[in-house]
Image: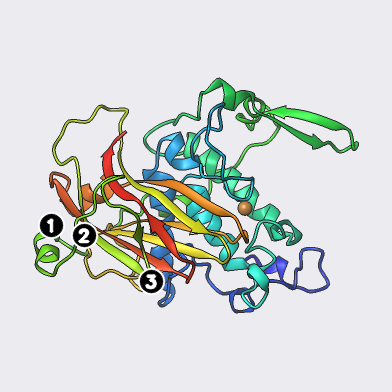
Amino acid sequence: MPAMFLPNDSSLYDAKRNQANLPPTLVKLVPTITGNDSEIINQNLNAMYQDVVTNDKAELFMGGAYVTGTDLSNSTVLSAPLGGSIENGIHNAMHFWTGDPTQHLIQDMGTFTTASRDPIFYAHHSNVDRLWDKWRYGLPDGPRADHSEDDFLSAEFYFYDENASLVKVNVRDALDSSKLGYSYPDLAADELWINYSPPPVTSGSAVQAALASGVPGVGPYPQNGTISLGSGLTAIVAAPGNQSKSSDEREVLVIQRLTVTRDSFVAVLVLVNLPSANSSTVTSSAEYVGTYNIIAAPGKTLTANVKMEIGDNLQRIGIQNETEVVLTLAVKGTQPITIDGLLIHYE
Ligand SMILES: [Cu+2]
């Protein structure tokens, strides 16, 4: 948190922040992170790497396009099932980290109905916009593509301008920041997470060891019934192995029909090839896939197919040709979560 947000006589001040996280405390971009400064930094760099670098398609990074026919039957602005890695990962983690855990729903930043009461909200969201720009144009593999669906590009939002006049903005009008009159400078610090290159801490498949210790198999929906995660679930999951993949496909983990009532903050960490992983497991290695952070919105039930790119993880560990892998979903929080299946496939 920049020090300028701290003085209580400043317009940037907000009393409802986590008092344990004030400057110069290091941010934690996964809510379970512990350790000394270098351990925290490496876990932060891996969170950035996984959420922004490896989730390189629009649906994975920013979530599904909001188009006619999208099933939002159990959704509101507070409970959208379409989020991607940046929103559900580092963005939500920052809301959780900044809000005051002694306040109802971790206000202000920890719940979306009060988040914008904290001036840091605007700096946070400006940085999310900057990271989108970085994702789109600034990574080594070249420019990436935004959603192209016409419904999405034509979606309309209404704002008041600086003269208090109502103006309409289409999504397509907001894709190019240079047309909006601003751009972002290159920051040397971005190179740290872009080039983080998470090292594996395992070698070889953990499937045999997991089988020997009784780890169950979990397949795609609907063959499993409904599975309660409790504090976590370790499972053996089928993977495409050496099936061929076209250049526009990615190897994606889908946590199918994850369902939770959002009465309090809860997070699901995903780790691969670590059968004994739990919510205390260090997340700086290639075995860390990502985190699905769920911000509290009381009474709202969310059902989502959570998607995360996993091919880069499997490649780095050297188990990309295996037809089964061990997955662990570790839960931080007490809100009951169920899933209906686990699927790793190309899409
Ligand atoms: Cu936000």
Q: Is residue 56 visible?
A: yes
Say which residue label 3 marks.
39
Residue drawn at the location 53% of the way across and 59% of the way down: 261
Q: Residues within 10 Å of mark 3 (few under 14, many from 20)?
A: some
Looking at numbered disc 1 in the image, what kind of residue is underneath it?
Answer: Ser
Between 22 and 236, the one lying in front of the other is: 236
Disc on res. 273? 2
Q: Residues within 10 Å of mark 2 (few under 14, many from 20)?
A: many
Gap in angstroms between the C-alphas marked 3 and 2: 21 Å
Looking at numbered disc 3 in the image, what kind of residue is underneath it?
Answer: Glu
For label 3, the SS is: helix
Between 12 and 324, the one lying in front of the other is: 324
Residue 210 vertical position relative to residue 317 in the rendered view, above or below: below
Looking at numbered disc 2 in the image, what kind of residue is underneath it?
Answer: Asn
For label 1, the SS is: loop
- The quadrant in which residue 33 appears is bottom left
Residue drawn at the location 40% of the way across and 32% of the way down: 142
**Are the residues flagged by discs 2 and 1 in contact, CB closer than 8 Å?**
yes
